[in-house]
Amino acid sequence: MTEQSLRQDAPAIEVKDLCKNFGSNEVLKGIDFHVNQGEVVCVIGPSGSGKSTLLRCVNRLEEPTSGTILVEGVDITDPETDLDKIRTRIGMVFQQFNLFPHLNVLGNLTLAQQRAKRRGKAEAMDVARKNLEKVGLANRENAYPAQLSGGQQQRVAIARALSMNPDMMLFDEPTSALDPELVGDVLAVMRQLADEGMTMMVVTHEMGFAREVGDRVVFMDGGVVVEQGKPEDVLGNPQNERTKAFLSKVL
Amino acid sequence: MKPSTRRRLFRGVLYAIFIAAVAAVVLLADWQAIQTNFLNPEVFSEQFPAIITTAAKNTVVYTVIAFIGGLLLGLTLALMKLSPVAPYRWVATIYIELFRGLPALLVIFGFAFAIPIAFQWRPPGGTAGAGLIALIIVSAAYMAETIRAGIEAVPAGQREAARSLGMNPGWTMVSVVLPQAVRIVTPPLTNELVILIKDTSLLFIAGMALSQRELTTFARDGVSQYANATPLVAAALMYLIITLPLTQLVARLEKRNNRSR
Ligand SMILES: Nc1ncnc2c1ncn2[C@@H]1O[C@H](COP(=O)(O)OP(=O)(O)O)[C@@H](O)[C@H]1O
Ligand SMILES: [Mg+2]
């Protein structure tokens, strides 16, 4: 197999004219979107606007109907592309955490390292412990997901994704399923990641996070990108009527 | 009349009818005849030890073979039915619908004679062995549906999480989906096991050597040998000794699963 060409100068994520239909339901209607390396892009918009679908197309959990998606310069819509390999470079964090309930925290963090990255057990444990420390849960490595709070579960899920040493992280409303008092811990971990220079695409309703941590904010509505730019511009001085209407509801 | 009074009255009438029915059966039955024909102590003790060392042992051995064989074949069929490859799905669907739609007795009878003819090969154990293969084939069809339902009951987010970490479909199935499906399918599969224990009695149709007889065949032979039905009662007792702990286990497992959800 030929080594997939990794272009260091290419954007981390580049989406061109992406369309996605579910049956007759046109969910994405020609999206152009990119995330540069080291950039934190927050995607906002009303529910049903296609934010999750866009994010899930980026690691091909959804099959695009048409358009191209380049990840570090590699066309992932090309049938020849080794998706499993690309996915080890893209960390993903779900709204519902999706931890493996039959494995303890260490098991959750080491499984894919061993199965997909072919790391030895000792190395996988080392990496796992470092990442648990990073999310502040070093003392819970033997707990099962059901024994953890939602906030702890989400931090474990972040550590699980980080344990693959991804080049970028995708977050799909990572705090929407949490009790309000647990949101802060998760956002703090994400903020720390951003400070370390991680490339991040974050679908979120946390406008404070988007304003303070985001390098760019993208507003989506009805399957198109309506407006994007610096957080202070899009959130503080929106130009489009739909953006204004949305922000007046959530701010 | 208050509704509660009416309900109590109604229940009283039901109890009265029930007691009358039991009393009628008890009074009308010929206890002398029942005892000599079904509960003859001499015939009963004559059943031992062969009823345990041969008949019950064979029932258990046949059940274990049919269950393990059915489980492996059933898992294969379940995975085929869930496969993205359409022809695999078709084959699995046809297989499952065919063997769930036919009486097990007919399939066993057919295979016991068809296998030696079709393959010019006598399976180990002769016609009984061929009957056992048929039992595996039939039970696999039922287990496939149970296992498929169990796999589908694992939330889609589990598969997505594993795939997003770069695990391939095989490892995702083996390390993430199946371990969770096992918990879900254990109670219904234990039920299938209990059904299978009873279904080994159908193997008699294949014809059996003396040493191959399982409980029901053994009991039927006993009935004709002694011209007495006591061997049936002895066999019934043996079945219950085997099945009751299993049905209790199912109840416990189901309670545990309900709690953990
Ligand atoms: N798997 C699916 N099958 C069918 N329709 C879907 C599926 N996933 C999403 N949709 C539809 O796509 C639209 C956009 O959904 P989504 O991307 O989840 O929006 P958002 O994340 O912005 O709330 C919705 O109308 C939703 O019903
Ligand atoms: Mg969404």
Image: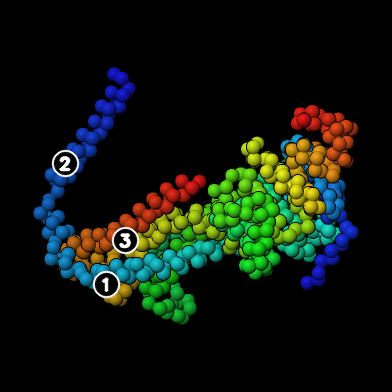
Indicate the quadrant where residue A128 lies: bottom right
> Which of the pair A210/B174 is nearer the observer?
A210
Residue type at the position of mark 1: Thr
> Which of the pair B122/A105 is nearer the observer?
A105
Residue type at the position of mark 3: Ile
Marks 3 and 1 sit apart, C-alpha to C-alpha, by: 14 Å
Residue B36: x and y in percent read: 12, 59
**Residue at 29 percent of width and 18 percent of height:** B1
- Numbered circle sitting on residue B23: 2
Secondary structure beneath label 3: helix
Same chain assignment for discs 3 and 1: yes
Secondary structure beneath label 2: helix
- Numbered circle sitting on residue B53: 1
Marks 3 and 2 sit apart, C-alpha to C-alpha, by: 31 Å
Badge 3: how crowded within 10 Å, few (<14), some, or many (20+)?
Answer: some
Indicate the quadrant where residue B164 lies: bottom right
Indicate the quadrant where residue A79 lies: bottom right
Whether tag 3 and tag 1 are in contact, CB under 8 A, the answer is no
Mark sitting earlier along the chain (3/1): 1
Q: Is residue B112 above or below residue A249?
A: below
The mark closer to the camera, 3 or 2, is 3
Secondary structure beneath label 1: helix
Residue at the spot of label 3: B242
Residue A176: x and y in percent read: 68, 40
Name of the residue lying farthest toward the top: B1
Q: Is residue B116 above or below residue B81?
A: below
Q: Is residue B231 above or below residue B150?
A: below
Same chain assignment for discs 3 and 2: yes
Whether tag 2 and tag 1 are in contact, CB under 8 A, the answer is no
The mark closer to the camera, 2 or 1, is 1
Marks 2 and 1 sit apart, C-alpha to C-alpha, by: 39 Å
